[in-house]
Image (cartoon, rainbow, N blue to C red):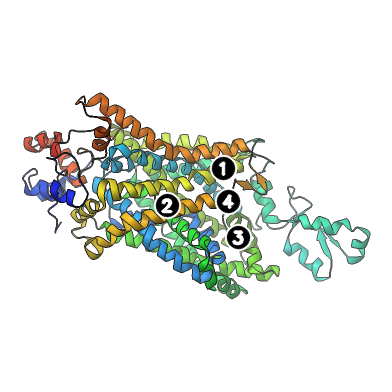
């Protein structure tokens, strides 16, 4: 530790617009103050206490970096960014993309990592910097909870395809299966017929003469569906016609969903002690597979055309507002901010870890992965376009359509197709697992922070969480389950996530204070990043909030009711989706009202309503303080010889009585 006095006298804070409490208050003591003022024995003792903390820490820095990278780098990096780049100007899209990374993504990303590390707690602890607004942390956990339900369903799909790859012939290769409809079309099967000017329909080749006798055949071919499309919708999902027709559960999907949750549980049953080891493989091996796909892809015929479509700049599109909105949205969502996982992961760091450097590494690594994945994806899409005799724009798609329909079509045309299929879906499985770890860890950490005694039975807590989420995801394995999966994914983390991020930025920049946040960072890393912190102060207080608000408006303008495969979900389903979207935001005023009510109950000091509101915007002196200070107190408590001077100062630090603990 170097370079920080940490003594924030009231007059200094008032000069910066960052008051904390009444006229005699001071900020809760910094780590350096607590040591220099004799409230701890020595800084060495404090560091030793941190090592022995019941909460635990990462085994080393690599575990934290890989966990954050695995969390940020998810399915969207592979199946969403390349398509966005192609449709929004190719190489020109990188300009708004990296500008939005600089002005929106990185500032919020750094806020979350640094606040979690400073306080040594998850979202519930972090937002005790302003107890009135602790509901923001609760909203983050709600988003993570809802996201964890459907995300593992997608992992189960990837697992289903991965198991289907253990065959000599891929099950979605061709239209000769019992489940195929007359409209099933396979280019490989149709090619000999079409080369002789025939028309292929229902496994039959119709010559021009036969078409004269059966003219309706030509019209029927307009309804053709590809073999992988029928495998996805009919064989795997057995999709019903509407969300109101749930049908029966698929035992195969139910089993793969169960296996997916067992995998997640085995990796997180001991918290970061187990997940930190798992990420050595789950966060690195996808890069190995991406590199393999890249080198295989660029050797295929048509690959150059695909990469050209991916990168060819269309400068005129930079004048289109939607391009900038898509860039900002992609950055915000791909960094996984606003869901509590980053705060949770960083809360297990040592207090003096260089969180600024880590934020740069992870954020830039995430963007590089997205960009590189585009080469692997579009080189192979270029090959597919060449094989089908189509333009790249006709085969390029995003989302589950790319992963479970377009890509399976491609691999059937590669030598040793089952191997390439296995590698691709194994990569999706690993990408999904990494992201799932963080969501579950955020929920589990919140539970353990509220009820510390449950740390003794951490595997049981993890098991209960996984079982509950598995049961909630089980209906998505029914015939109408795809509509529920789409409903939850579409509404749970859309505009509500952006709004949570917007409010989060306002809390730290304007309620708690950006300069105060910079002081906290200086305590941890020993310096103020970039121009003595002024660069980040401007981003946190002005630029990021304005841009986040603009993204929010853009999301509302671009919003359309959810539809899937041409089927628009009924009003009651859309209404349920809006409830899921609103609940994570509505919880903020609910928690604020509860805090005010609780203050009336516990502090009968005659304060007015506004005085109580102002008081509740100040940091809780018990929860919001350096994690290393808490660790020293924990050790002293165990030894039964806590320093009386520190104990008494803790009760009324800075003249502010203890507002509450973490628990809501």
Q: Position of residue 28 (x, y in %)?
A: 16, 43
Q: Earlier in the sequence, mark 2 or mark 3?
A: 3
Mark whose residue sits in front, 1 or 4: 1
Instruction: Pick the quarter of the image with the N terminus.
Output: bottom left
User: What numbered label is drawn on residue 163?
Assistant: 4
Question: Residue most toward the right?
Answer: 213
Question: Please, what secondary structure does the residue beneath circle 2 have?
Answer: helix
Query: In the image shown, does 249 or 486 lie closer to the viewer?
Result: 486
Is 417 drawn above or below residue 128 in the view shown?
below
Instruction: Pick the quarter of the image with the C terminus.
Output: top left
Question: Please, what secondary structure does the residue beneath circle 1 have?
Answer: helix
Q: Residue at x 64, y 63 (%)?
A: 395
Say which residue label 1 marks.
Answer: 487
Q: Position of residue 255 (x, y in %)?
A: 56, 40
Q: Is residue 181 left or right of residue 627?
A: right
Say which residue label 3 marks.
Answer: 397
Q: Position of residue 216 (x, y in %)?
A: 87, 56
Say which residue label 2 marks.
Answer: 549
């Amino acid at each position: 530790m170097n370079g920080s006095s940490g003594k924030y006298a009231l007059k200094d804070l008032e000069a910066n617009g960052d008051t904390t409490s009444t006229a005699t208050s001071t900020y809760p003591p910094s780590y350096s103050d607590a040591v220099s003022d004799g409230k701890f024995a020595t800084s060495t003792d404090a560091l030793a206490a941190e090592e022995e903390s019941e909460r635990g820490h990462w085994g080393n820095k690599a575990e934290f970096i890989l966990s954050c990278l695995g969390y940020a780098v998810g399915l969207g990096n592979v199946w969403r960014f390349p398509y966005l780049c192609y449709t929004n100007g190719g190489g020109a899209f990188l300009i708004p993309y990296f500008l939005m990374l600089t002005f929106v993504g990185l500032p919020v990303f750094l806020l979350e990592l640094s606040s979690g590390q400073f306080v040594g707690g998850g979202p519930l602890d972090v937002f005790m910097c302003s107890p009135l607004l602790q509901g923001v942390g609760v909203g983050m956990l709600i988003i993570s909870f809802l996201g964890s339900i459907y995300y593992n369903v997608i992992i189960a799909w990837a697992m289903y395809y991965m198991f289907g790859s253990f065959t000599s012939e891929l099950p979605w290769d061709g239209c000769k299966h019992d489940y195929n409809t007359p409209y099933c079309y396979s280019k490989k099967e149709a090619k000999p017929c079409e080369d002789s000017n025939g028309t292929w329909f229902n496994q039959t080749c119709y010559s021009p003469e036969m078409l004269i006798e059966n003219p309706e055949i030509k019209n029927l071919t307009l309804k053709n569906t590809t073999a992988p499309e029928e495998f996805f919708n009919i064989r795997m999902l057995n999709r019903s016609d509407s969300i109101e027709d749930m049908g029966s559960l698929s035992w195969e999907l139910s089993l793969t969903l169960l296996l997916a949750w067992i995998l997640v549980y085995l990796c997180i049953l001991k918290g970061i002690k187990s997940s930190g080891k798992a990420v050595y493989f789950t966060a690195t091996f996808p890069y190995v597979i991406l590199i393999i796909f890249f080198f295989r892809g660029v050797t295929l015929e048509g690959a150059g055309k695909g990469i050209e479509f991916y990168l060819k700049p269309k400068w005129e599109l930079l004048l289109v507002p939607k391009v900038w909105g898509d860039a900002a949205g992609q950055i915000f969502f791909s960094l996984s901010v606003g869901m509590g996982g980053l705060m949770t992961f960083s809360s297990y760091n040592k207090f003096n870890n260089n969180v600024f450097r880590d934020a740069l590494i992870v954020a830039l690594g995430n963007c590089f992965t997205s960009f590189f994945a585009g080469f692997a994806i579009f080189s192979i899409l270029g090959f597919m376009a060449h094989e089908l005799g189509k333009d790249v724009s006709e085969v390029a798609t995003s989302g589950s359509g790319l992963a479970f329909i377009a890509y399976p079509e491609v691999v059937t045309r590669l030598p040793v197709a089952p191997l390439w299929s296995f590698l691709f879906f194994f990569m999706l499985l690993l990408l999904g697992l990494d992201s799932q770890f963080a969501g579950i860890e955020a929920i589990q950490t919140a539970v353990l922070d509220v009820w510390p005694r449950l740390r003794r039975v951490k595997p049981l807590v993890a098991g209960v969480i996984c079982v509950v989420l598995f049961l909630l995801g089980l209906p998505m394995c029914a015939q109408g389950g795809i509509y529920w999966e789409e409903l939850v994914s579409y509404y749970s983390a859309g505009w509500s996530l952006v709004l949570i991020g917007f409010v989060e930025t306002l809390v730290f920049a304007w309620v708690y204070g950006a300069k105060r946040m910079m002081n906290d960072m200086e305590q941890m890393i020993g310096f103020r990043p970039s121009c003595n912190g002024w660069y980040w102060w401007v981003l946190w207080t002005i630029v990021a909030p304005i841009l986040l608000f603009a993204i929010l408006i853009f999301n509302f303008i671009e919003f359309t009711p959810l539809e899937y495969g041409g089927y628009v979900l009924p009003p009651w389903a859309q209404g349920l989706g809006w409830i899921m979207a609103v609940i994570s935001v509505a919880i903020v005023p609910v928690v604020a009202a509860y805090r005010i009510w609780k203050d009336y109950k516990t502090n009968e000091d005659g304060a007015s309503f506004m005085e109580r509101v102002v008081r509740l915007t100040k940091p809780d002196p018990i929860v919001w303080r350096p994690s290393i200070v808490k660790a020293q107190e924990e050790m002293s408590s165990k030894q039964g010889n806590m320093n009386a001077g520190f104990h008494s100062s803790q009760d009324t630090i800075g003249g502010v009585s203890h507002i509450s603990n973490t628990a809501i």
